[in-house]
Image (cartoon, rainbow, N blue to C red):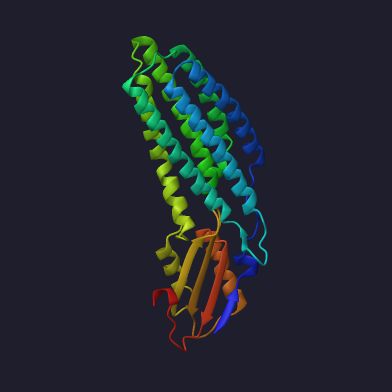
Amino acid sequence: MHAHHGHEHGHSHQAPASFGKAFVIAISLNVGFTMVEFIYGFLAQSSALMADAGHNLSDVLGLVVAWAGVLLARKMPDHRFTYGLRGSSILAALANAMFLMIACGAISWDAIRRLADPPEVSSMTVIVVAAIGILINTVSAWLFVKGSKDDLNIRGAFLHLAADAAVSLGVVIAGVAILLTGWNWLDPVVSLLIVVVIVIGTWGLLRESLQLALNAVPAHIDLNEVEAWLRDQPGVLDIHDLHVWGMSTTESALTAHLVMPGGADDAFVDGVADQLHHRFRIQHTTLQVERGDSEHVCVLHR
């Protein structure tokens, strides 16, 4: 039995982008706006505005957690943490999703309470403050657009901010409707609609981050396609003990046993690792080559 590791091609330990400037700007903008929004929401007796402020506060916490996850993920491996702290970004994404769900519960409770006895709402104040929120959250979300495509943790930060921009738009619409009709009950109703929007937008983040935390195959990788490709490699008679999981929200790992009666040299293993990186975005590959002289069964399947 021969154990080979594609160190040059298969092991990519480059630190992920930190988005430090984006986090500083977004956190600063949202801290300031959250304080202003809550104060004016309280003065205007607007549950929708205070609900949005509460959601913005969860955004600030979420941004801090996401940034911490990014920074921890940049820590290089050592003898204690042989993968580094890359998994921190997964935990940050999961925490972000949970923050949003908790915020939804708080918003729903307050909206239902106010729906029974809707207070008079200062609609013009609501409209102006929420309009400012649209601008701030749109600018903040734009800072994370690029990273949201490939990094679940950054996507969590982006979803927080994009949802807030949409929520603020809803609050503006509610303010205009109340100004025109005098129907104060629209304010808590919009709060409940806000909850629905947040839950729908967050569910995918919660599901995917939870799956990664449980070492599931990352969503962008088709395991059957990876296995079929490995079986098609020259000299490969069989394959077993194939495992693929996410080391972080941006990096994936693979281990597999290849049954090759003719054996394989380092060039073959490095080439396979390189192709797995470019074809399937698997950065860390460990392959064990066997001649097939004895029966091997994955201990997890016994």
Quadrant in the picture for the C terminus: bottom left
Percent coordinates x, y for residue 218 in the rendering: 47, 57
Image side of residue 240 versus residue 2, left or right: left
Between residue 151 and residue 171, name the one nearer to us: 171
Query: For residue 191, what is the image quadrant?
Result: top left
**Does residue 245 appear anywhere in the picture?**
yes
In which quadrant of the rendered view does residue 228 lie?
A: bottom left
Relative vertical location of residue 261 with respect to residue 286 in this rendering, above or below: below
Position of 185 relative to 300 (above/below): above
**Residue 107 located left or right of residue 67:** left
Number of on-image labels: 0
Residue 108, placed above or below residue 65: above
Identified at 64% across, 49% down, the residue is: 71
Q: Quadrant of the N terminus?
A: bottom right
Is 189 placed left or right of 83 in the picture?
left
Residue 38 vs 241, above or below: the answer is above
Q: Residue furthest bottom?
A: 293
Residue 38 location in percent, x, y?
52, 23
Residue 11 found in image quarter: bottom right
Q: Residue at x 49, y 76 (%)?
A: 257
Residue 235 appears in the rendering: no
**Residue at 56% over, 35% down:** 60
Where does residue 116 sit, x and y in percent of width and height? 31, 22
